[in-house]
Amino acid sequence: MKEKLKVILDTDTYNECDDQFALAYMLKSQDIFDVEAITVAPYQNKQCTVEEGQEKSYQEILKICNWLNFDTNNKVFKGAKDFMINGYGESNDAVNKIIEIALKNEKTYVMGIGAITNIALAIQKEPKIIERIEVIWLGGHSFLQGHNIETNFKDKIAVKIVFDSKVKLTVIPAKNVSSNLRTSIYELEHFLKGKSELCDYLCQRFYNDSYHDIQERRVIWDISVIAYLMHKEWFEEKEISCPNIKEDSSYELTKDRHKITMVNYLDVDKIYTDLFNKLGE
C-alpha cells in the first residue's frame, strides 16, 4: 500500500467559494492525504478586516470538516492577523504548528491556496524546515501577464521570502493556468445538487459567495493544488531558475539562481471529473 502524503492546507477559506471546494476535495481524498493541519491564511476585502476574515475562515473550516466527519481536534489553527508587507512579523498558532509538523516528519507537503504569509513566517522563524517541506502554492500569474496583481500575491514580502529561501517550491499561476478551471452553476448542480448538505452548500456558495455577488460561471482556482499532489500526470510543468520579485510585484527572469517548478498547463476535464465523483459520493 502506498504511503499517504503528510499535508498541511493553508487556506483563506471564506474569501471566495473555491477554498471550500479545495478543502472538501482534500478531505474526500484521505486515502492519499494524511491531513496534519489546516491553517488559516490572511485575507481582507471591503467586507472584513484580516482579523474578521480569520474568524470567518476558521468557522467555515469547522463547518466543512463537521459535514465530512473530520475530527478537528488539534488540527485547525488561526494564522497571521496581517501581512508582512504591512510590517506584521508575529508568531501565531498556524506558524508554530507548521514548524512543529515539519520538524517531526521526514517530508511534509504544504499546500498554499491563499496569501503565503504563514508559510513565509514559519520559514523565517525556523529555517530548518526548508529541507523538510515542499510548498505547492497557487499564486501570481503566468509570465505572459507581465504582472502579479492578484489576491494571493498581495503579501509580496512573504512571496520573496519563500522564493528566496530555496525551499522546494511549485507555483501554479492564476491567470493563464488555474484560470482555465472555469465551470458553471448548471454543471455544478447537475453533478452535486441534492447529493448532500455539503454539496448543496457548495452550489449555493458558488452561485452567490456574498462578496462577488451572483455569478453563473466562475473559476474554482484552488482545487488545482489538491489535484496536483494527487495526479501530477494531469499537469505540465517546467523547472526554471527562480525569478526575482521586483518592487512592482512582477517577475524578473533569471538564469543562474536555484530552481523552482512552474506549472503551465492543467487538464480541466480530468480534475473536474475527479472532483465531482468524490464530492458526489
Image: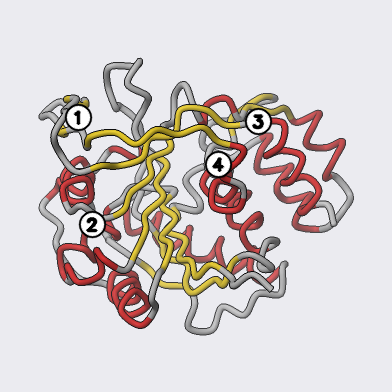
Disc 3: which residue: 268
Dots 2, 3 in contact, CB < 8 A = no
Looking at the rendered structure, the kind of residue marked 4 is Ser
- Work out whether mark 4 precedes mark 3 in sequence or the reverse, and give the earlier one: 4
Query: Which residue is at the front of the view, 163 or 45?
Result: 163
Closer to us: 55 or 122:
122
Amino acid on which the number 1 mark rests in the picture: Ser
Figure disc tally:
4
- On the rendered structure, is 159 left or right of 189? left
Q: Secondary structure at mark 4?
A: helix
Q: Earlier in the sequence, mark 4 or mark 1?
A: 4
Image quadrant occupied by the C terminus: bottom right
Indicate the secondary structure of the residue bearing disc 2. Answer: helix
Mark positioned earlier in the residue sequence (4 or 2): 2
Is the residue 36 above or below the residue 259 in the image?
below
Which mark is on residue 120? 2
Q: Position of residue 20 (x, y in %)?
A: 60, 52
| Inter-mark Cα distance, 2 to 1 | 16 Å
Residue 143 placement, left or right of 211: left
The mark closer to the camera, 4 or 1, is: 4
- For marks 1 and 3, the one nearer the N-term is 1
Q: Quadrant of the N terminus?
A: bottom right
Tell whether label 3 touches label 4 (CB within 8 Å).
no
Residue on which disc 4 sits = 224
Are there few (<14), some (14-19), or many (20+) residues within 10 Å of tag 1?
A: many
The crowd level at tag 4 (other Cα within 10 Å; few <14, some 14-19, many 20+) is many
Q: Residue 172 in the image: x percent, y percent?
A: 43, 37
What residue do we see at 28% from left, 61% from top? Answer: 80
Please state which of the two labelled residues, at mark 2 or mark 3, is closer to the viewer: 3
Cα–Cα span, label 2 and label 3: 30 Å
